Amino acid sequence: MKIEMISTGEEVLSGQIVDTNAAWFANVLMDNGLELQRRTTVGDRMEDLIDIFQERSKQADVILINGGLGPTTDDLSAEAAAAAMGVNLVEHTGWLEHLEGWFANRGRIMPESNYKQCLLPDSAILVDNPVGSAPGFRLKLNNAWLFFTPGVPYEFKRMVEEQFLVFVRETFGVTDPTRLAKLVTLGHGESTLADQLTALPVPPGITLGYRPSPPIVEIKVFARGSAGIQAMGDYVFQVKEALGNAIVTDRFASIAEEVHTLLVEQQQTLAIAESCTGGMLTSQLVDFAGSSDYLLGGLVTYANATKESILGVATDTLAARGAVSLETAAEMAIGARRQLGSHFALATTGIAGPDGGTDDKPVGLVVIALCDGEHCWVQAVRLVNRTRSLVRIMSCAVAHDMLRRRLLGENPIVDYPFIERRDMQVLNSS
């Protein structure tokens, strides 16, 4: 079965917005034992839409079309689909009644422009949108089923999960049992990981894949059919053995979620002091419900004066060592833990760039400290040729990984082949 996706919209084609829907869709397909064969992006031009619908419908079995179902004049998907089929647009009375009621329940009269969303290609089958005004629909053109969805991510995802996947399974008889294991790694390149696994024969029914998404590389072990599923447990164990501490979680999509869960499970508390990461380290944990159970506070102490007044970093330390130093990071973590009374504290300070570096302290130099009641582990890493944003993102990943390892009773500081370490210390935190 060949599954394709067509993303529509000038803003997507021109790069004004990132097509996160496409990335999410491909990932969900893989999680469900399906593969995306091709993705095409096309602008809001009638001729281009008609051409791509006709062309790809001769090659694919099912095509998901995302976007172009709104009420404005540049939303052309339904009209283009009708033209590609050689049929008229017809009013869907049921959706018109639904939409009028949708607006009435909100104390509003349906704008005339929304009537456009009630016009579907003749013979198209409506696909319900439970959370928006634009209905989806599906129709058969040439060899393929075309499945139309709105571009609003929340609406799109609901329709994929609740209707598209069901339609594909029922229509194409996707019945083989599948299973997927995801192993998240940090600090190792995709090719390095692949080299480490070369000696492991991949059992029949199992597919091994890599998805780099800095700062992590996700390894996907996909099993299809009873033979693959039966072999999966042993194979995943062998992969874990081969990669060792490169793996930072095998149950979540991010290190932050792993740390969040460990803190909740172990009933430990955390304080955070940030400089170069500017609140990102804290925010990544706040993304998860229940973070208030352990996160006592996050302090963004960007200025040196704030490091002194709030965290108690010594004036002499800043004068002699500078803000980006092992000593300052350690005092930041110790001060945050003392101020908030937490079990653990994390601190970051560094030069995210693109300016501000020196020969001694270049752009990309970041110092990270982890403190508990007895020790303070501090390391200085150099993130070379990274953007300001990626320096901050990678700094957060290393910081969370230090805490993750400590929560598991491991050494918080490990070697990452793709991250240069400049220095490290283990100090008494009392």
Image (cartoon, rainbow, N blue to C red):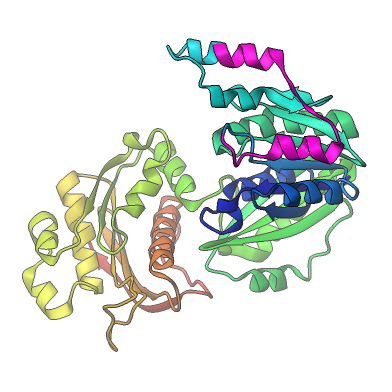
Residue 301, image x, y percentages: 19, 58
Along the line of sight, which residue is nearer the eye, 254 or 202?
254
Position of residue 69 relative to residue 326, above or below, is above
Q: Is residue 314 visible?
A: yes
Q: Quadrant of the N terminus?
A: top right
The residue stretch that appears in magenta: 72-100
Residue nearest the viewer, comparing 205 with 25: 25
Q: Residue at x 25, y 67 (%)?
A: 427
Residue 219 locus on image (x, y percent): 67, 57
Residue 83's image quarter? top right
At horizontal 59% and vertical 45% (from top left) the residue drawn is 251
The image quarter containing residue 365 is bottom left
Apparent side of residue 377 relative to residue 173 in the rendered image (left or right): left
- Depth check, front residue: 85 or 267: 85
Left or right for 232, reference 413:
right
Tell me where residue 267 appears, x and y as whole percent. 36, 37
Residue 233 seen in the current view: no
Give me the residue at 29% from left, 64% from top.
276
Which residue is most to the bottom?
Answer: 359
Left/right placement of residue 389 relative to residue 111 reads left
Work out whether 102 lies above or below 301. Answer: above
Decide which of 50, 377 is in the foreground and name it.
50
Magenta span contains residue 76: yes
Question: Residue 285 appears at what percent x and percent y?
Answer: 39, 45
Report the number of numbered marks.
0
Quadrant the C terminus occupies:
bottom left
State yes or no: residue 78 in magenta.
Answer: yes
Would you identify the image quadrant in which residue 151 lies? Answer: top right
Above or below, 369 against 365 in this view is: above
